[in-house]
Image: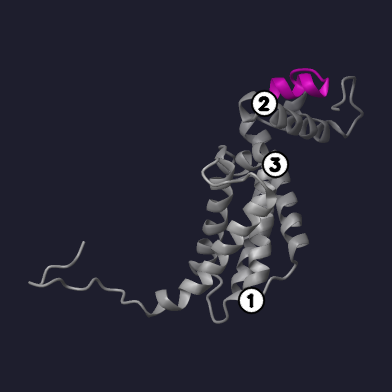
Amino acid sequence: MAPTGTYHHGDLRAACLSAARELLEEDGSAGLSLRAVARRAGVSATAPYRHYADRDALVSAVAAEGYRELAQHLAAAHPAPSTPDDLASVAVAYVRFALDHPALFRVMFAEPCDPTDEERVAATGVITAYVRGIVRDTFPGADETGPLPTTVWALVHGLAFLHLDGKLDASSAEVVAARVRAAVHALFTASPALSSAPTARTAAPGGSPHG
């Protein structure tokens, strides 16, 4: 439970973050404001402004905390994935994190944040480096700074939101894991066929391109 009395010097920021996380879990981001955080933390209405200039700054801090937790969650699933099965395990962990922390996940990826916030930039950088490492070790010869890391992240992130929004069955952890694993393995199965497919559109009879 968030503190309801006075706060000790030095722990106001932590108290505000804890209060913000509680509000998120209860009411979603709609109920998240500096005033609401102050009430929940048991401090004056102006106290949170000592650390957060506005709501976006608060949201950025919450998002940064979420990114750090996500990075730890992925590393726990596999610290250095290098095979399709490893990547599938990481993908399942990513989707599971979204389903276990829906309000936090939406704040991380669907709420306006301060793009210049150093803490948030550093936290997202850890995940970016992790994804690039996956591409380097799982797709030999691939450019880890090219578009493939974005492709991998987009696939897994899309699966997370499709399950989160109820577009895919999330009735059990087993159902989710099986679908996510199948999707990841489909990427590897399709890769050889896609790489050998013609890149230009084939001309239709009469010289007109299909499309």
Say what amino acid the circle numbered 2 marks.
Answer: Asp
Return the mark for residue 137.
Answer: 1
Scheme of image coloration:
one colour
Residue 8 lies, in percent from the top left, at: 92, 28
Q: Amino acid at mark 1?
A: Asp
Q: Earlier in the sequence, mark 1 or mark 2?
A: 2
Badge number at residue 27? 2
Asked if 55 appears above or below 171 in the picture, the reply is above
The Cα–Cα distance between marks 3 and 1, rounded to whole angstroms, is 29 Å
Which residue is labeled 3 in the image? Answer: 101
- Secondary element at tag 1: helix
Neighbour tally class for label 3: few under 14, some 14-19, many 20 plus, Cα within 10 Å: some
Disc 2 crowd rating (10 Å Cα; few below 14, some 14-19, many 20+) is few
Give the mark, 3 or 1, whose residue is nearer the N terminus: 3
Instruction: Examine the structure image and report whether residue 106 is included in the region drawn in magenta.
Output: no
* Separation of marks 2 and 3 at Cα, in angstroms: 13 Å
Foreground residue among 192 and 133: 192
Using the rendered image of the protein, determine whether residue 60 is visible from the camera's viewpoint.
Answer: no
* Drawn side of residue 93 relative to residue 190, left or right: right
Q: Residue at x 90, y 21 (%)?
A: 6
* Residues drawn in magenta: 33-46
Q: What's under tag 3, amino acid-wise?
A: His
Q: Who's the residue at 70% across and 20% down the image?
A: 35
